[in-house]
Image: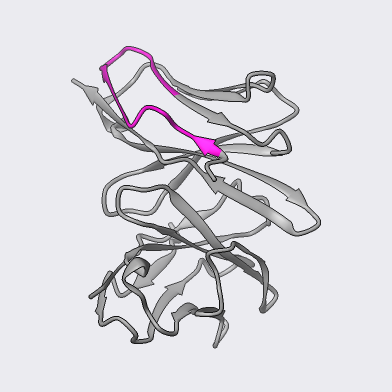
Amino acid sequence: EPEVTQTPSHQVTQMGQEVILRCVPISNHLYFYWYRQILGQKVEFLVSFYNNEISEKSEIFDDQFSVERPDGSNFTLKIRSTKLEDSAMYFCASDTTRSYNEQFFGPGTRLTVL
Amino acid sequence: DQQVKQNSPSLSVQEGRISILNCDYTNSMFDYFLWYKKYPAEGPTFLISISSIKDKNEDGRFTVFLNKSAKHLSLHIVPSQPGDSAVYFCAAYHCDVAGNQFYFGTGTSLTVIP
């Protein structure tokens, strides 16, 4: 069964460093998403991406965040200058439609900012 | 702001009995409500959804009820099975001129006791 994959599973970085989280969505999907979950808190929507541009973004997704689909298969989330509060699980998801009803989620990347 | 709330962080149910997970929301403009299930170390998995124009949707052992006047929805699992033990997230979204706005609750951890 096709699945969304994410690498790395765990990323540790120093505050102020740049990190890139990688996702490989399901191959025939067209809509891509990033979410995060700070430990013990709710899952939060960050951004949706379609046709090589951002469709929607939340207020969390500020100028330090960016997304890219560099090669038609990977979907990346870059955090330019990490802060302690960026420590969270980051989930990638993909879908064939924009409805959110059939999203497939990856296993997540745990980001720890020291 | 917590537009979607799950006030019970945990729930324990005997195998074979009914599990009822509750969710409240504040935004009457939500178009769709969804339930996701999440196992440890995995991403959320879509479970069932309901449109705001309906009051019930059933899929096998899972039924979602929507009470728009009370801004309340619930997920019923019957009969509950040990494999249902997971964290359940309620989510909601609506479409407006800014695009889709998507919100998750904080989750309810369900334990089904054999």
Residue situated furthest right in the rendering: B97
Percent coordinates x, y for residue B84 in the rendering? 32, 31
Tell me if residue B16 is in the magenta stretch: yes
Residue situated furthest top in the rendering: B17
Question: Which quadrant: the N terminus of chain B?
Answer: top right
Question: Which quadrant: the C terminus of chain B?
Answer: top left
Highlighted range, magenta? B4-21
Residue B114 visible at all: yes
Percent coordinates x, y for residue B50 in the rendering? 64, 32
Percent coordinates x, y for residue A110 in the rendering? 29, 66
To which quarter of the image does residue B53 belong?
A: top right
| Residue B93 appears left or right of B64 | right
To which quarter of the image does residue A5 belong?
A: bottom left
Of residues A96 and B100, the one nearer the viewer is: B100
The image's colouring method is one colour
Up/down of B112 relative to B31, above or below: above
Tell me if residue A61 is in the magenta stretch: no
Of residues B6 and A22, the one nearer the viewer is: B6
Of residues A93 and B83, the one nearer the viewer is: A93
| Residue B68 appears left or right of B65 | right
| Residue B5 appears left or right of B69 | left
To which quarter of the image does residue B87 belong?
A: top left
Of residues A69 and A61, the one nearer the viewer is: A61
Up/down of A94 relative to B113, above or below: below
Residue at the image point whose x is 46% and y is 81% from the top = A78
Number of residue marks: 0
Up/down of B74 relative to B41, above or below: above
Residue at the image point whose x is 40% and y is 77% from the top = A21
Up/down of A62 relative to A39, above or below: below
